[in-house]
Every structure is written in structure tokens, then in C-alpha cells.
């Protein structure tokens, strides 16, 4: 059995991280050794030293800034001493025996390049992990729903429920187990993405190398969705804005210029129309926090579009690749 490097990227999600690290601290395996590497994206709030003292057997790395999820993962991988990488969200909790089963399923099935597992939330609901790569017709919600309804028989055949594994085209970056050789084959995580869509991109590049992406049904990990990225209204608006920005990055990278042009326009028009309507509705309903978030998203997105036009780039200003290009 191969040993495991667990890599966690954190930014001010200390409450969630504490529960995650407690579960790892109490985890005992008789089959493999594991190290835990926490890359803190410069939270700079005084908590890091306390966590270093409490979890002295874990490795803490303070990043140079809030450089995004992809960069944090790459920093962790560079400092890992084992050949199996488990990228894990800080808002996850490891359940009893789950890692042993998880690692065993990966090692004993070498045809799988990247493995995830079942994820359950605080309401005991399992996440839908039957995911396909976005296409021109399925990039947006309503067309995607129509496509899935039309092709529901075909999709059901892809995700057969009578097997120990099923094979989505991509899995969420919250729980990803991958061997170092595969990680290096695709040059790690793409730091063009500051946050979100980098997991879709990661899996797409694995697929391009003829690697197989799978989910094992043999183990389950608790995952509190949004527990580490939506701490307050401003953070929630920021992360939701970055979802939109990352979609622009993904479109540019994985679609032709012709198709990409129409997808960019559709995304731009759809976001502005939706957020303007919801922002207007928030005026008489100022007490509604969910509607207020949309006003902040609209402002954030307007600044992003202005920045994109001025700098001739679709990258987020927070993206490390943008910062490097700006310095260059």
C-alpha cells in the first residue's frame, strides 16, 4: 500500500478546518502512513500560529497571498513527500475507515487515474456527482436541464448504479485522490483559475491524457457545501462572482474562438440581466440577504468586465497568472 499526502487549502475557514483536522488527527490506519499539509492562503488573522501549536504533527505552509485554490494545491503538492495526493476541502470530515477503503480502491484499480468518493452533507443528502463536461448546448442551466431530460436513458446507462464505481467526466475538487505521476503528466492545477471551474479543467486534462475519472461508492466523506468559502455576505458575493469569472476562463481555454464568442456573450448578457432584476427587487426587500448578495455580485462583475476590457484579458485580477503577467 502506498503512503498518502493529504493537501488542504485554507483561507479563513478556521472553524471548518478545525473539525477536518480533528477527524484526521484521530484517524488511525494500519495499512499506510499519511502526512497532512495545510496551505493557508495568507489569512493573516492570527489563527495560523494557534493551529500550528494545536496540530503540531501536521505541516502548515503560509502562502505568499490569497493566490487561489489551484495555486494553494500546487504549493502543497510541491511540498508533499509521498506519491499519492489527496486534495481535500477544509469543510470536509473524514469518517471512520474511509481513507483505508478510499486508498485501497485507488491502488487496486490502476486503470483509474483520478478517484473521488461519495460525499454527504449536514442534512444526510448525497451530492449529485453524475457530471458531464460542459458543451455549447449544456453550458447553462436551462439548456442543460432540457438536454439531461432528453438523454436521461443514455445518462442513466453511463452512471450505472449496480457497480462499485461510476465514471463521471469530472468531479468536484473537494475530494480528489491522484497519483503524483498523473498530477505531473498534466502539470498540476491550472492557476489561471482563482477559484472554481479548476476541477472541471483538471479532469478534462486527465481525460485528454486518456486517464479515467471515477467515483467509488465504497466510502463516504462528509462535506459541508460552501462551509469554507461563504463565511459572510461579502465573501459569498465574491465567491459567486469568481464562479462567473472562471466560466469565462474555461470558455476561452476549452472552446474555439467562434463558439467561445457566443458563450461569452450569452454569459455576459445573462448575468447582467439576472443581477439587475434581482438588484431592483432587493430595494423594497432590503432585509432579504439573498437578494442583497446579487447587488454586490453585479458591482463585482461590472468591475471585472471593465478590468477585462482595459487589460485585454479574461483572467480574474486575483489570478496568480494575471499578477505574473502584470509584473512581466
Image: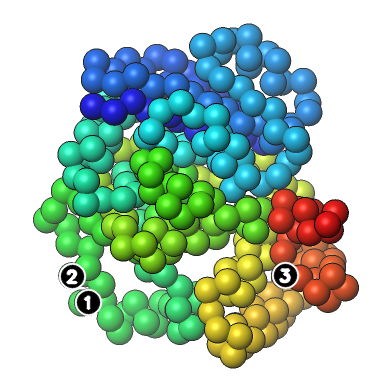
Residue 146, visible in the rendered structure: yes
Where's residue 154, x and y in %? Answer: 22, 77
Q: In the rendered view, would you say 281 is above or below 3?
A: below
Q: In the rendered view, would you say 83 is above or below 304?
A: above
**Cα distance, mark 3 to mark 1?**
35 Å
How was this image coloured? rainbow
Residue topped by disc 2? 157
Identify the image quadrant of the C terminus: bottom right
Q: In the rendered view, would you say 252 is above or below 178?
A: below
**Cα distance, mark 2 to mark 3?**
37 Å
Q: Is residue 275 left or right of 72 when viewed as pictured?
A: right
Picture quarter containing residue 272? bottom right
Name the residue at 55% across, 35% down: 78
Picture quarter containing residue 244? bottom right
The one of 63 and 51 positioned closer to us in this rendering: 63
**Cα distance, mark 1 to mark 2?**
5 Å
Tell me whether circle 2 and circle 3 mark residues in contact (CB < 8 Å): no
The one of 220 and 49 positioned closer to us in this rendering: 49
Tell me whether circle 1 and circle 2 mark residues in contact (CB < 8 Å): yes
The one of 195 and 239 positioned closer to us in this rendering: 195
Q: Residue furthest left?
A: 162
Check disc 1: other Cα within 10 Å, few if <14, some if 14-19, many if 20+: few
Where's residue 142, x and y in %? Answer: 48, 79
Q: Which mark is residue 314?
A: 3
Q: Secondary structure at mark 1?
A: helix
Where's residue 195, x and y in %? Answer: 63, 53
Where's residue 149, x and y in %? Answer: 32, 79
Residue topped by disc 1? 154
The one of 141 and 114 positioned closer to us in this rendering: 114
Amino acid at each position: 500500500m502506498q503512503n498518502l499526502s493529504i493537501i488542504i487549502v485554507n483561507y479563513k475557514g478556521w472553524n471548518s478546518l478545525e473539525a477536518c483536522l480533528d477527524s484526521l488527527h484521530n484517524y488511525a490506519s494500519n495499512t499506510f502512513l499519511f502526512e497532512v499539509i495545510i496551505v493557508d492562503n495568507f489569512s493573516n488573522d492570527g489563527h495560523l500560529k494557534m493551529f500550528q501549536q494545536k496540530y503540531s504533527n501536521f505541516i502548515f505552509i503560509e502562502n505568499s497571498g490569497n493566490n487561489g485554490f489551484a495555486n494553494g494545491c500546487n504549493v502543497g503538492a510541491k511540498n508533499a513527500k509521498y506519491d499519492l495526493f489527496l486534495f481535500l476541502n477544509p469543510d470536509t470530515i473524514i469518517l471512520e475507515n474511509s481513507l483505508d477503503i478510499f486508498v485501497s480502491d485507488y491502488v487496486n484499480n490502476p486503470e483509474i487515474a483520478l478517484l473521488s468518493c461519495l460525499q454527504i452533507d449536514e442534512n444526510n443528502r448525497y451530492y449529485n456527482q453524475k457530471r458531464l463536461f460542459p458543451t455549447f448546448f449544456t453550458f447553462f442551466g436551462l439548456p442543460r436541464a432540457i438536454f439531461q431530460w432528453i438523454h436521461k436513458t443514455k445518462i442513466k446507462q453511463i452512471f450505472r448504479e449496480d457497480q462499485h464505481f461510476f465514471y463521471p467526466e469530472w468531479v468536484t475538487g473537494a475530494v480528489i485522490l491522484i497519483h503524483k505521476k498523473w498530477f505531473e503528466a498534466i502539470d498540476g492545477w491550472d492557476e489561471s483559475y482563482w477559484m472554481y471551474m479548476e476541477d472541471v479543467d483538471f479532469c478534462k486534462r486527465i481525460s485528454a491524457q486518456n486517464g479515467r475519472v471515477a467515483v467509488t461508492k465504497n466510502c463516504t466523506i462528509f462535506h459541508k457545501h460552501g462551509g469554507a468559502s461563504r463565511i459572510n455576505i461579502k465573501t459569498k458575493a465574491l465567491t459567486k462572482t469568481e464562479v462567473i469569472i472562471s466560466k469565462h476562463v474555461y470558455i476561452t481555454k476549452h472552446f474555439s474562438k467562434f463558439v467561445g464568442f457566443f458563450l461569452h456573450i450569452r454569459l455576459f448578457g445573462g448575468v447582467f440581466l439576472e443581477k439587475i432584476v434581482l438588484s431592483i427587487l432587493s430595494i423594497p426587500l432590503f432585509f432579504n440577504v439573498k437578494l442583497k448578495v446579487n447587488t454586490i455580485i453585479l458591482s463585482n462583475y461590472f468591475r471585472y468586465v471593465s478590468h477585462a476590457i482595459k487589460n485585454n484579458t479574461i483572467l480574474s485580477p486575483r489570478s496568480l497568472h494575471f499578477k505574473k503577467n502584470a509584473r512581466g
